[in-house]
Amino acid sequence: MMHVSRWMLAGAALMVGAAVGMTPAQAQQYPTQDIHVICAFPAGSGADVLVRYFAEELRKKANRTVIVENKPGAAGNISAEYVVRAKPDGHVIYIHAGSSTAANYHLFKKPPIDPAKDLQVVATLNQQPFMVMVDAKSPYKTLQDLTAAMIKKGDKATYAQSNTTGKVMGELYKIATGVTAVEVPYKTANDSLNDFASGSVDFGMMDPVFALVQEREGRLRNLAVSTSKRMEAVPNLPTMTEGGVPGVELFGWFAAMVPAATPKPIVAQLNKWFNEIEATPETKAFLNRFGGDPWITTPDQGQAQLAKDQKDWEDYVKKAKIEQQG
């Protein structure tokens, strides 16, 4: 299957050679038809809400109909490959976590695409941290408190995670501190709530949407974020470095991406539109509700982050001893 996909991609690249040479005058006519935004999550999911927000704002900028198509499955690989195979003319856009797209290259034995080569980031949209959290009744008020207690508890300590990023974050924390807590995986973050309440798990490494909702409901307490600097969305939460755990920098980020052969004038136009959308107070407030901050970059900066994440995740997969999926 991998070989078939590569031959198809190669053939597509030959067919669009003329499009790559599009002149600035031709690019000014863009878009010339409806724009299709591809979402890797089911309709109604949290990520789908984010994708649809940006799709609606893009509609206003482009003055064209923007259609959101949900193509879930294979951790985003189905939608990513669909976009890579699409005509590279800016009318098919992938809005997804660039961090997850990069990670998938090392999480699967036969990844259908090479993200850093097959996709072009037109704009980064946000940054989202993962969070270290404990039960609201826990005696641990800071990350320093938690680390000291977990070192004493040894291999009787436990931590919760519900996805690959949380698993990697837990392993990086353990490597940095000497904590030997046992990982407890959950199918969904909500499945961990009873074990937090009963004390079966001591702490968790969770996504910001879950973390912020549970803290607002008074069930859990957030101790630190996984980013290198504090987030505007949660300015009172210290970084893990501030909490005595240096060297942990792990964050999720969404991006708008197109096939790699998309002409540069169209990439530049899309970057301009998305950056203008992010610069509004409404977008900042929207992203802050999900625990993230707007992240405005150039296409080259976004592409560099995609390549960096793809390289970093090779090391993360090894450190966390993650078994590749078939």
Image: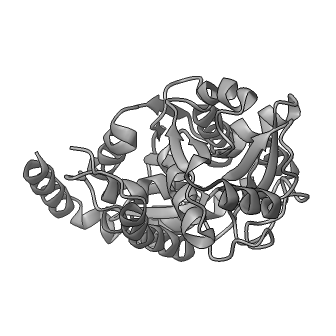
Marks counted in the figure total: 0
Q: Which percent across, then down, holds residue 66?
A: 55, 36
Viewer-closest of 188 and 232? 188
Residue 279 shown left or right of residue 209 in the figure = right
Q: Which percent across, then down, holds residue 299?
A: 54, 70
Q: Residue at x 52, y 48 (%)?
A: 182
Point out the image quarter for the N terminus: top left
Name of the residue lying farthest toward the right:
236
Point out the image quarter for the C terminus: top left
Q: Quadrant of residue 297?
A: bottom right
Viewer-closest of 114 and 280? 114
Residue 169 shown left or right of residue 242 in the figure = left
Viewer-closest of 170 and 76? 170
274 above or below 305? above
Q: Residue at x 76, y 43 (%)?
A: 134
Q: Quadrant of residue 178?
A: bottom right
Q: Is residue 5 visible?
A: yes
296 above or below 277? below
Residue 233 shown left or right of residue 5 in the figure = right
Viewer-closest of 158 and 269? 158
298 above or below 31? below
Q: Is residue 30 visible?
A: no
Q: Which percent across, then down, holds residue 49?
A: 64, 32
According to the image, what is the colour scheme of the structure? one colour
Q: Which percent across, then down, holds residue 41?
A: 48, 33
Q: Quadrant of residue 320?
A: bottom left
Q: Residue at x 33, y 53 (%)?
A: 107
